[in-house]
Amino acid sequence: MTTHLPVVVNVADAPSNRRRGGDLRAMLTPSAVGATSGFMGLAIVEPGERIGEHYHPYSEEFVFVVCGELMVDLDGVPQPLHADQGMMIPIGMRHRFRNVGTTEARLVFHLGPLAPRPELGHVDTEQTEQTEQTEQIKQAEQTIEQPVHRHVGQPPHADAPEPAEAVR
């Protein structure tokens, strides 16, 4: 018999992940609570936002809409999902969540079983605006960190990238 009480995690304490669109909060995870069979979290999706298309090669995904109106694209086929409705997305099925309503949507998700390693559990099949912005920032940081080599007699700015190049 366990002598500890279960860990309680508040959504505000879960780290925000916006790389794939929306605001994903993985709350009850192996690292946060010692989960061994899966993990659970909350997705907050503003009107017009989407969580980019992806699939899970090892896990089923169970979702429940707390509030809002979503369109879930399942292998390219749109399926409405409203407040107080849930769905199970099979292993390997491509899916994307789009907020088609006028208010914030909140979606509870649970994935299980766990992938052999965390980086194997999620495969993106499209880029979202957020992933494109993240890539642009990484490229700009790499450009800034690269040393500028000048030849004697060249003006200091001759080898410096144009501002537009640093953001691509």
Image (tube, rainbow, N blue to C red):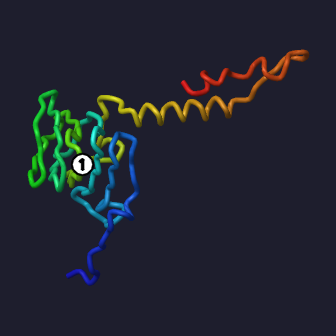
The residue positioned 16% from the left and 38% from the top of the image is 71
Residue nearest the viewer, comparing 155 with 35: 155
Residue nearest the viewer, comparing 67 with 161: 67
Type of amino acid at the residue the image marks with label 1: Thr
Rendered location of residue 42, percent (x, y): 27, 55
Side of 137 relative to 148 (left or right):
left
Rendered location of residue 46, percent (x, y): 30, 45
**Residue 89 appears in the rendering:** yes
Q: Quadrant of residue 99?
A: top left
The residue positioned 26% from the left and 35% from the top of the image is 54
The residue positioned 47% from the left and 36% from the top of the image is 134
Q: Quadrant of residue 14?
A: bottom left
Residue 164, above or below 87: above
Label 1: element kind: loop
The residue positioned 32% from the left and 67% from the top of the image is 33
**In which quadrant will I find the N terminus?**
bottom left
Rendered location of residue 163, percent (x, y): 64, 24
**Residue 57 appears in the rendering:** no
Tag 1 residue: 103
Residue 95, above or below 76: below
Q: Give the farthest residue toward the front.
A: 102
**In which quadrant will I find the C terminus?**
top right
How many labels sit on residues?
1
